[in-house]
Amino acid sequence: MASLVGWQLLALPFIHAMQARAEAALQRYPVKAGFSQRGPQGRCELLRVELDWSQGTPVAQLAGGQGSHMLSAASQAHGYLMINPGTDVTEGGAYPYYPISQFNA
């Protein structure tokens, strides 16, 4: 997962810059969490999530296991929920959401 996220957030923008391609700023939106979870300690964490639109507004749900070896969660995810260090995720709380579709080359 670190390689995938590193590619999407660091390597791909670098390659685009080397090709003199204009790189748009990352899109992010506040999205409510549909789950609670203890927050990361000492680092930011990107949780792989799916959006549930059944209530009319998007609610982020975890896309499978979040371990670094869980590539199936990456294939199911609609985007990332960014959680700051020491911030617990509370159900109904809003967190920055980054759609995966913006990382397509």
Image (cartoon, helix red, strand yellow):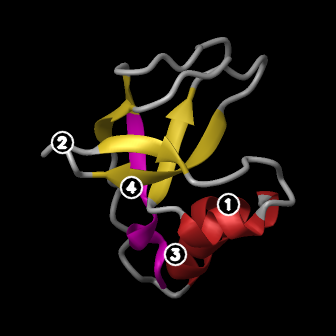
Q: Which residue is drawn at 86% across and 60% down?
A: 69
Q: Which of marks 2 and 4 is nearer the N terminus?
A: 4
- The correct choice, above or below, for 80 with respect to 20 in the image is above
Residue under label 3, please give it.
17
Residue under label 2, please give it.
55
The amino acid sitting under disc 1 is Val
The part of the image, by quadrant, that contains residue 24 is bottom left
The amino acid sitting under disc 3 is Ala
- Are the two marked residues, 3 and 4, in contact with CB atoms closer than 8 angstroms? no
Residue under label 1, please give it.
5
Q: Nearer the viewer, mark 3 or mark 2?
A: 2
Crowd band around label 2 with a 10 angstrom C-alpha radius: few (<14), some (14–19), many (20+): few
Give coordinates of residue 104: x percent, y percent: 46, 80
Spatial CA span between label 1 and label 4: 13 Å
Give coordinates of residue 43: x percent, y percent: 74, 26
Q: Which residue is drawn at 34% across and 46% down?
A: 28
Magenta-span inclusion, residue 101: yes
Spatial CA span between label 3 and label 1: 18 Å
